[in-house]
Image: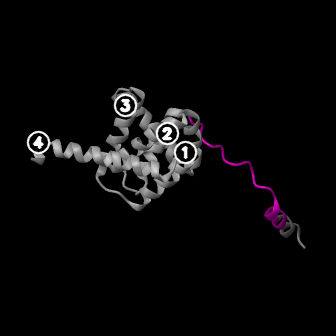
């Protein structure tokens, strides 16, 4: 057997190089990145959802418009670089106490439903995320119903709705 062939065969069984480093995640950025992931779940990251992400970030962290935009930009990059939701939820579980996590589900549903539509991909993401956060599907369903009720209430109170 030639030396070249032997090296090729050995290369097949050689250990892989070190794994690619995972991006460093701060709590705020991980929270924002999961909001972005929720908005992108159906591959339609639209202006309504971006506005909803911004509104949640402003409310949750008390940020002004410039800081919200900067945080969202970091979150968009982190979300794109993070392969799965497990890494994001692991950081989030360190930041948000268990009893406060249902409130975060409300934030996620607010972003998802900002465009007035629900998609299978979004439902699937929310089932996964609620499970990874240690919550039940029922908690997610309750959060979704609350967000939908608030949206319906706002629509009913709108002067254009009359």
Choose top left, top right, bottom left or bottom right for residue 122. Answer: bottom left
Q: Is residue 93 left or right of residue 42?
A: right
Of the image marks 4 and 2, the number of the one nearer the N terminus: 2
Secondary structure mostly seen in magenta is: loop
Provide the residue designation for mark 1: 133
Q: Quadrant of residue 26?
A: top right
Q: CA distance from mark 3 to mark 1?
A: 21 Å
Q: Earlier in the sequence, mark 4 or mark 3?
A: 3
Residue assigned mark 2 = 101
Label located before the other in sequence (2 or 3): 3
Residue 29 against residue 162 in the figure, above or below? above
* Residue at x 22% of width, y 44% of height: 153
Q: Position of residue 74 (x, y in %)?
A: 47, 37
- Whether residue 3 is in magenta: the answer is no
Dot 4 or dot 1: first in sequence order is 1
24 sits left or right of 60 in the view: right
Q: Do callouts 4 and 1 mark residues in contact (Cβ within 8 Å)?
A: no
Q: Position of residue 71 (x, y in %)?
A: 44, 33
| Real-space Cα separation, disc 4 to disc 3, in angstroms | 26 Å
Q: Count the marks.
A: 4
Which label belongs to residue 59? 3
Q: Which label is found at residue 159?
A: 4
Dot 2 falls on a residue whose secondary structure is: helix
- The secondary structure type at the circle numbered 1 is loop
């Amino acid at each position: 057997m030639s030396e070249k062939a032997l090296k090729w065969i050995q290369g097949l069984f050689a250990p892989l190089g070190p794994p690619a480093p995972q991006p460093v995640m701060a709590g705020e950025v991980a929270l924002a990145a999961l909001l972005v992931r929720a908005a992108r779940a159906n591959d339609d990251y639209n202006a309504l959802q971006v506005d909803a992400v911004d509104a949640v970030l402003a409310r949750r962290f008390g940020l002004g418009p410039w800081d919200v935009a900067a945080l969202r930009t970091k979150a968009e990059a982190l979300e794109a670089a993070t392969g799965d939701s497990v890494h994001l939820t692991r950081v989030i579980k360190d930041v948000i106490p268990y009893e406060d996590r249902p409130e975060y589900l409300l934030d996620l549903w607010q972003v998802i439903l900002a465009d007035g539509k629900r998609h299978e991909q979004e439902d699937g993401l929310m089932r996964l995320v609620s499970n990874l956060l240690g919550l039940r599907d029922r908690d997610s369903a309750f959060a979704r119903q609350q967000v939908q009720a608030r949206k319906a209430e706002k629509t009913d109170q709108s002067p254009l709705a009359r």
